[in-house]
Amino acid sequence: MLVNILGDIMRFCYSIINNYGIAIILFTLISKFVLLPLSIWVQKNSIKMVKMQPAINNIKIDYFGDKDKIADEQAKLYKKEKYNAFASLIPLVIQIVLLLGLVKVINQPLTHILNVKNTTKDNLTNIVLENNKDLSEDSSSLEVEVVKEIKANKNIKEYSKVISKDEIKDIKELKLSFLGFDLSWVATEEKGIAYLIPIIAGLSALILCIGQNKMNVLQAEQSNMNKYGMLVLSVGLSLYLGAFVVAGVALYWTISNLFAVLQQWLLNIFINPKKYVDYEELDRTNKELQKLKDLNKKNKRTKEQIRREKQDYKKFFKVVNKHLVFYSESNGFYKYYKSMIEYILENTNIVIHYITSDYNDNIFKLEKENDRIKAYYIEEKKLITLMMKMDADVVVMTMPDLQNFHIKRSYIRKDIEYIFVPHDQGSTNLTMRTGCTNHFDTVFVTGKHQHEEEEAINKLYKIKNRKIFDCGFPLLDDMISDYKENKKTRKEKTVLIAPSWQKDNIIDLCLEDILDATKGSDYKVIVRPHPQHVRHMKEKFEQMKKDYKDSKNIVIQTDFSSNDTVFNADLIITDWSGIAFEYAFTTNKPVIFIDTPMKVMNPDYKKIDIEPFNIWAREKIGKVVKLKDIKTIDKTIKSVLDSSDKYKKDISKLVKEYVYNLGNSAEVGADYIIEAIQNKIKERRSK
């Protein structure tokens, strides 16, 4: 049916022009007009995709390495923006369908140009087959061969028996020549200028690809590999068409490519992508994402790391009767276990098996100092199978989402007690994913607020056997101890700006405004960005150092070798960073919160009727400043500093009420772990 429609259009074009080459060009132009609404839709859809690209880049940055989460968030964005990811393929599919249909039309001039009856065509093609043993009944170009023979006065007597003189005349007058090329030629079967046909077709594809790479809003943003890959594919296909298909098809393909360049130029004029796409933001996020990719390449594992992982994996399973296993995602997580591990080593003979996904974890140094620490380097992929085969009495983790994603409970032992240790004093219901601790047997909580939330979660999800243990926060005890030992007194008041790494933080929204508002004040302002900011926005902070080098009270700090700056500041300014509670609870000093968009990892946090600690406690330990009030932040800073004695009392009271076992939380947590191991041993002996 499609071939018949295309044939009717081609016959119409030929009847107007009476030249097959120009008819093909006219046919191509008509097809572009017919498909123009589709081309406009694709242009708009492509613009929509590039317009979304900064948001997509931010998703890839925020969840770098987490392919499942990136795919989920990207799907949500596509749904929200009503973007069809397959729209850009539609023109290509239609082009291929048209090409296949047109190949048949051009190979059948008797049918689609001269409208010869079927019985007559069969008789004509039989004559060609009888006189050309190289041809078969399945040959696609039998009608072309008939035209060639009649035009060359070959076998005319035989043809005259089948068709009239007028019909022979019509066939002879069929103008298959165009610019010196016979449109019935197949380049590989001819000589002379016929060899130019594939070259011309290939050049048209090259022009199209270069034009698309520069003008097409979506193609322009593709990687060089995609751009040049498409160029090679397109040119290769065009060379093939030009060499092995009749010249009429090659002409259509060539003209279609050239019209496509013109059409793209016109579409960019009338639907200009620059009106819709924020190219500055696109460039910024592209660079930031590329830095992450480059960093990931730098961090690619060495042969030694791979070898070490294999050895440690085997070593782990060679040990039988393991009582206690700790898992750490990286070197920085040891601090949450430190005091409990030290207590266990000092007061028991338990061997601690410590798995880390960080090749450079300091635990390997401690292993050399204490023969009851057994450390293992296992990357996250290998960790999946290790956890499935886990054989131990107790497994302690700070990593949430056990059983929810790739890390599962043991398939070997169903009686392992999995203990979750929080690495934040805030609301776990707000800042971690839905159900992130539901599959642990025991959840350590730092204080009253977390206990109430976990109880409500047990009730909401009808979890019967999950224990909530009032441990406290060993890290806070360590920080308080270190602070008292290293406390420094400064004559000059110091304000520390410590933003989070979440989206729409202080760095993104208002850092320069804060610095401009505090420039020249009688207190020192230190900007201490999150390490990830420095890693991915190094040029920005180097420029800021230059911009504020003449401001005597402003320092941009990118060296994180010491925490002195944090705990010796008289006041910190942050957004939703967990450092706020660590700082306030350690020093009893106030915090100013910039009211940036809230960090919500759990969209279902309101299902339990408890206001998150991260929200209501802000007013207890300091002041909240709206973004619109940043220009007057200097007054707020001075007011809070002047009220430091009042805040000291308020914060101290809050700590006593909302932090469990202050001063001995490590001992309490370690005793629970020891007792859990002893209970497991008793259970086995009683069987």
Image (spheres, helix red, strand yellow):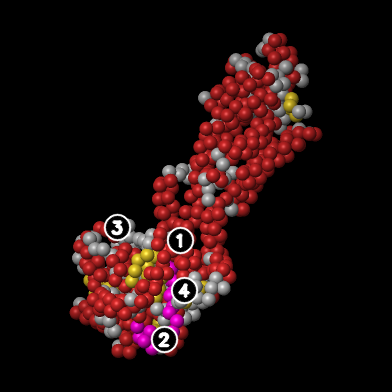
In the rendered image, is residue 350 in sight? no
Sequence-wise first label, 1 or 4: 1
Which is more toward the observer, 300 or 218?
A: 218
The residue labelled by disc 3 is 604
> Rounded to the nearest whole Å, what is the CA distance between mark 1 and mark 4?
22 Å
**Closer mark to the observer between disc 1 and disc 4:** 4
> Rounded to the nearest whole Å, what is the CA distance between mark 3 and mark 4?
43 Å
The residue labelled by disc 1 is 509
Sequence-wise first label, 3 or 4: 4
Give the residue type that dot 4 points to: Ser
Instruction: Name the residue rendered at 43%, 84% in the picture.
Output: 490
**Stretch of the chain drawn in magenta:** 480-500
Is 488 located above or below residue 557 in the figure? below
**Closer mark to the observer between disc 2 and disc 4:** 4
> Do the numbered discs 2 and 4 sit on residues whose CB atoms are within 8 Å?
no
Category of crowding for the residue at label 2, using alpha-carbon neighbours closer than 10 angstroms: few (below 14), some (14–19), many (at least 20): few
> Do the numbered discs 1 and 4 sit on residues whose CB atoms are within 8 Å?
no
| Residue 659 drawn at (x, y percent) | 27, 76
Give the residue type that dot 2 points to: Thr
Q: Is residue 200 left or right of residue 595?
A: right
Q: Is residue 213 left or right of residue 191?
A: left
The residue labelled by disc 2 is 489
Which is more toward the observer, 639 or 195?
A: 639
Sequence-wise first label, 2 or 4: 2
| Residue 52 drawn at (x, y percent) | 48, 50
Give the residue type that dot 3 points to: Asp
Q: Secondary structure at mark 4?
A: loop
